[in-house]
Amino acid sequence: DAGITQSPRHKVTETGTPVTLRCHQTENHRYMYWYRQDPGHGLRLIHYSYGVKDTDKGEVSDGYSVSRSKTEDFLLTLESATSSQTSVYFCAISESAEGSDTQYFGPGTRLTVL
Amino acid sequence: GEDVEQSLFLSVREGDSSVINCTYTDSSSTYLYWYKQEPGAGLQLLTYIFSNMDMKQDQRLTVLLNKKDKHLSLRIADTQTGDSAIYFCAEKDRRAGGSYIPTFGRGTSLIVHP
């Protein structure tokens, strides 16, 4: 299995509080991604990074920010959590973004916003 | 924008074949993927097919691609209870900036009963 960890694995928080999720990889892959998974919606891309300090938005980026100060870490921040951000969040990595390249997924973080 | 559609549920008996279907709208898709997600886990790549291929076989898995109809299917022969999972179809096309970022379907829950 690709070396990807996510922390925390579970979090319960209250509306309006800031939350930061961490994705850590040991594969030295250039690309990292944050997805959210919701029933009936599958996986939707929030943000992705193509290098240190290089990030871009996905299809559901509103309310989220990301940072990548080191190759191995990609942080997802909810500045002020809302109940609509209750979801399971997956981090993924890939060596490049070429068509044939595979994405490897972390185990997920279950976030509940009360 | 890109759209990937799958049926939500499939129920089969152990030992039968399972066929999971997927349609996509982006004719420029170059790679199409099947991922498997077991309960409480992240996604794992099962197989992928390049758009110039019609079929790809890998042990019990057969992928069929009908590019004209933009239809992709995954056949699992001799389905076992361990195959019970959610199966995601995904497609990649090149985005602005040259990166291939996948778009995922909503996932098909495969239930295998004895």
Image (cartoon, rainbow, N blue to C red):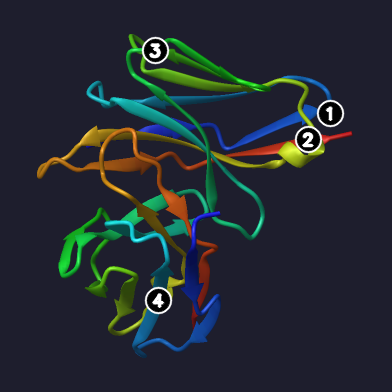
* Residue pointed to by mark 1: B14
Q: Residue at x 72, y 20 (%)?
A: B77
Residue A57 higher or lower than B85, as above or below: below
The answer as to whether the residues below labels 2 and 3 share one chain is yes
Q: Secondary structure at mark 4?
A: strand
* Residue pointed to by mark 3: B53
Whole-percent x, y for residue B61 in the image: 62, 23
- Amino acid type for the residue under numbered disc 3: Met
Tell me if label 2 and label 1 are in contact, CB under 8 Å.
yes
Give the total of numbered labels. Answer: 4
The answer as to whether the residues below labels 2 and 1 share one chain is yes
Label 2 – label 1 distance at C-alpha: 6 Å
Q: Residue at x 28, y 68 (%)?
A: A71
- Amino acid type for the residue under numbered disc 1: Glu
* Residue pointed to by mark 4: A22
Badge 2 sits on which subunit?
A: B
Dot 3, crowdedness within 10 Å: few (<14), some or many (≥20)? few
Label 2 – label 4 distance at C-alpha: 35 Å
Residue B24 higher or lower than B57, as above or below: below
Q: What numbered label is drawn on residue B112? A: 2
Label 1 – label 4 distance at C-alpha: 39 Å
Q: Secondary structure at mark 1?
A: loop
Quadrant assignment for the C terminus of chain B: top right
Badge 4 sits on which subunit?
A: A
